[in-house]
Amino acid sequence: MYCMNACNLPYSDVNKIDQGPRTKACGWTGECRGEGWISKTDRCSRPGVDSLLRTLPWRHALVQRPPETSVYSGMSKEYCLYDSGYAGDGCPTEPLKFPNLVTGFNVNAAHASRTALYTRYSPSDWQANNAMLYNGTDCTRNTAELVRAEALRLVRETDDKSSRGQMDSGKKLGERLTDINYWKQEIMKELDLKVHESHKLLETRQTLERMIKELDGPLHIAQENLYARESRQGVDLVHDAAEQALLCEIETIRNWQKKLCQQLDGINTHLAQGRASRHELERDLQRKEQAYQIDTGAAQLNNNSKDISFHSGIEKVDPTVSIPETWSGFTEALLKRSKLERATAQKVHAAIDNLLVQAANECWSAWNNSNNALTLRVAELLDAKNKITCHLSKVQQELYDMEKHMEIIRKSIEDKAPSLKVAQTRLERRTHRPDIELCRDEAQFRLVSEIQDINETLEQLQRKLVEVEAAHQQLLKTKACLEHDLKIKANSLFIDREKCLGLRKSFPISSFVTQRQTC
C-alpha cells in the first residue's frame, strides 16, 4: 500500500510519522492520503487515478499529518477516488474537501525548540565572520583594480589588433582581387582565341562538306560512263584501258570521300571538345566574376558600413573547397587544355588544306587519265572503223568480180550445151547405120572422145562454179560480218565519243578547289 499524500511513500514510513495506520469507518485499513485511502492494486487498475493524483498539490510528509477526510455515504469497502469523466454508478460526484493548511495541524513545541537551537552561532563565529568579510572586501577591491588595469590594456591591444587585422584582411582581399582579375583577363583572351578558332573550324568543315558533295559530280559521271559502256556490243565489250581508268577514277574518288569524311568526323570531334572547353572557361569566368564582385564588396566594407551584421560562429564553418595552389592550378589547367586544343586545331587546318589540295590533284589526275584513255579508245575505234570500211569496200568489189565470173562460168556452161547436143546427136544418128556400116571408125572414136571432153569440161565448169559460188557466199558472210562489226564499232564510237567524252568536257568541281589545285 502507498500513501497518496506523501509522494507515494510506503506504508511503513507513513506509520512511523503518524504513529499507526488510519482505519476507515467501513473497517478497511490502508495508508492515508489526504483525500482518501487507496490500495496499490486499485491505484494501478482504476482509470483516471494517476492523472488526478498528478494534479494534487505536493505536501511534505515529515511535518504534516495526513488530513482527516469525510466518509461518503453509500460507498462500499473501498474509498472511490474518481474523475468526472470516469464516474461509475453509485460513486459520489461532490468535490473533495481539504483541511486548512495554517490551522489544520498541531506542531510539537519541543521539536520546534530543538530545531531553532541548531541554527544559532557563537561570538567567535560572529567576529571571525566579520574579519573574513573585511579581508574579502580588500582582496576583492585589489583584484578589481588589477582587472581594470588589465582590461584597459586588453582594450588597447584588441583595438590595435582589430585595426591591424582589418587592414591585413583588406590588403589580402586586394591581392585576391588582383589575382582574380589577372585570371579573368587570361580567360577572356583565351575565349576570344577559342571563338576565332571555332569559326575557322566551322569554315573548314563547310569546305570539307562542299568538297565531299562536289566529288559526287565526277563520281557520278564516271559511273555513268561505266554504265554507258556496258551498252557496247559483241567483241567491243572489252575490259580495255578506258574501263580500267574509269574504275581507278571511281576508286580514287571514293577513297578521298572516305578520307574527307574521316577528317570531317575529326573536325566535329574537335568542335565538340572546343565547345566543352569553352563552356568550362565561360563557367570559370562567370565564377570568377561573381567572386570578384563578392570580394570587391567585402573589401569595401568598414566599421561604418550599414550592411554589416553579426554572424555568430561563421569562423567555425569552413565551406572552402580549394587552396590558392589548386585554385590557380584549376584555371591554369583549363587554359592549358584550351591552348593545346587550339594548337591541335591549327594543325588540323594545315592538314586539311594539304589534304584538299592533294584530293583535288589526284581526282583531277584520275579525271584526265580517264579522258586520255577514252580519247585513245575513240582513236582506236575510228581506226578500226576505217579499216573495216576499207575491207568492206574491197569485199564488195570482190563480190562484184565474183558475180561477173559466175556469170561467165554459167555462160560457158550454157555455151557447151549446143556442142554436146551436136556431138551426142551425131553419135546417136550414127547408131542408125545398117549392119556392117556400124563401124567403130575414127569418126566414132572422135565423137565419143568429143562427148567425153565436153562432159569433163562441163564437170570442171560446174565444180568451178560451185567453188565460185562458195567463195561468193563466203564473201557475203564476210561482208555481213564486216557490216555488223562496223555497226558495233559505230555504236562503241558513239558511246565513247558522245556519251562518255561528251560528259567529260569540264571538271565538275568548284573554283575553290581549282584555286587550291593551282596553288
Image (tube, helix red, strand yellow):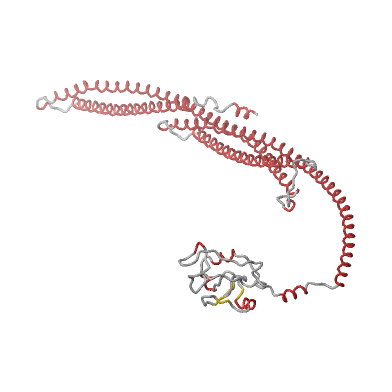
Q: Nearer the viewer, residue 444 or 340?
A: 340
- x, y percent for residue 293: 73, 39
- x, y percent for residue 199: 64, 33
Residue 441 in the image: above or below residue 92: above
Figure disc tally: 0
Q: Nearer the viewer, residue 495 or 14?
A: 14
Horizontally, residue 433 falls left or right of residue 201, namely left
Q: Nearer the viewer, residue 205 or 485?
A: 205
User: In what quadrant of the picture does the C terminus appear?
Assistant: top right
- x, y percent for residue 108: 69, 75
Residue 209 in the image: above or below residue 323: above
Is residue 357 visible to us here? Answer: no
Q: Residue at x 48, y 73 (%)?
A: 76
User: In what quadrant of the picture does the N terminus appear?
Assistant: bottom right
Residue occupying the far front of the picture: 103
Residue 218 in the image: above or below residue 321: above
Residue occupying the far left of the picture: 435
Is residue 430 visible to us here? Answer: yes
